[in-house]
Image (cartoon, rainbow, N blue to C red):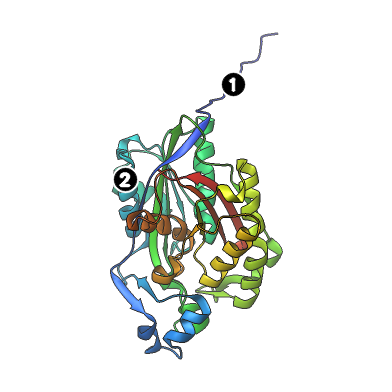
Amino acid sequence: MTDRPRLHQTTGPAATRILGFGSHQPDRVVTNDDLSQLMDTNDQWIRERVGIIERRFGEKDETLVDYAVAAGAAALADAGVEPSEVDTVIVPNCTMPSQIPNAAGQIAARIGVPEPGAFDLNAACAGFCYGLGLASDLVRAGSARKVLVIGSEKLTDSIDPTDRANAIIFADGAGAAVVGAADEPAIGPVVWGSAGDLAGLIYMRDHRYIYQEGQSVFRWATTQIAPIALRALEAAGLEPADVDVLVPHQANLRIVESIAKKLRAKGAREDLVVADDIRYSGNTSSASIPMALDHMRKAGTVHPGDVVLAVGFGAGLSYAGQVFVLP
């Protein structure tokens, strides 16, 4: 009897880090006053309800692939990484107009990434955190060396302009990060999960328009997401006081402020920097976390070495969070 062949299993570096960030938004700025010309709303009502002042809408001929190409290329430039060095491209999104072909392969080809593993991921507004967790684990397992993660959405194609509760919220854009090996851990374990029994709170109405039960989603997010963020800290071996920057998914400014308040009650510092990109970018689903961080880095409100706690949540209902160090 001959010995059975033994499989080899790859192993990679013990630690990973984010090497760079990039983002892109369409040019068209849409204010609350602009929306008041299209529906029964006004600037004060929108600011008080969700905290949004303006957002970006894409043109009819623009796609989430276009946004992702720009954001991905910017992240590679920020990281000092050539497209030829990337071997995996992950594109979290929930607004690709067709399931086939996926966005990732098209995006990789346009950026110039040669023959990567390329796939889309749909965890809606938690998508970037899911993608970042996967990227880190792929590198540590030895299945990838450098991974480009791009959250990209064109939500305006799925907005019913007569549904003012939802039409005021969503916008378009992309945010990206490059993940690679590190000498010491700079991306903590992802803590993720889902509440599938509540999936009906956010769905595609008539298979066309995004619809959510706003008050129910608000109650869920303001009670359930802060504990997820604390679990992500525990998984990383950190305390709330160790966090420099909090970046929740930019769904609603009141939700963001509620999460920050709960974390401060558990020991987070008063000088904790809290992302509020929702005010000028709207809700961009899987793009919101990396886009917010890229904007904050450019504005100088966050700095290399800062400890970031990110937590995404949305349709599914899906959620995920992790801690990482800013490049």
Residue 69 % position (x, y):
32, 53
The disc, 1 or 2, on the residue closer to the chain's N-terminal end is: 1
Residue 258 % position (x, y):
59, 67
Q: Secondary structure at mark 1?
A: loop
CA gap, disc 1 to disc 2? 38 Å
**Vertical side of 222 occupied by 38: above or below:** below
Q: On the picture, is 200 further left or further right than 99?
A: right
Q: Residues within 10 Å of mark 1 (few under 14, many from 20)?
A: few
Give the residue furthest to the top: 1
Res 123 visible: no
**Vertical side of 317 occupied by 189: above or below:** above
Residue 290 % position (x, y):
43, 55
Which amino acid type is shown beneath numbered disc 1?
Answer: Leu
| Residue on which the image places disc 2 | 78
Q: Nearer the viewer, residue 103 or 159?
A: 159
Q: On the picture, is 302 further left or further right than 185?
A: left
| Label of residue 7 in the image | 1
Residue in the image at 52% along x and 81% along y? 165
Q: Secondary structure at mark 2?
A: helix
| Label of residue 93 in the image | none
Which amino acid type is shown beneath numbered disc 2?
Answer: Asp
Q: On the picture, is 230 further left or further right than 78?
A: right
Residue in the image at 63% along x and 77% along y? 215
Q: Nearer the viewer, residue 207 or 140?
A: 140
Which image quarter is the C terminus in?
top left
Query: Residue 174, located in which quarter of the rendered image?
Result: bottom left
Residue 26 % position (x, y):
31, 66
Which image quarter is the N terminus in?
top right
Q: Which mark is nearer the camera, 1 or 2?
A: 2
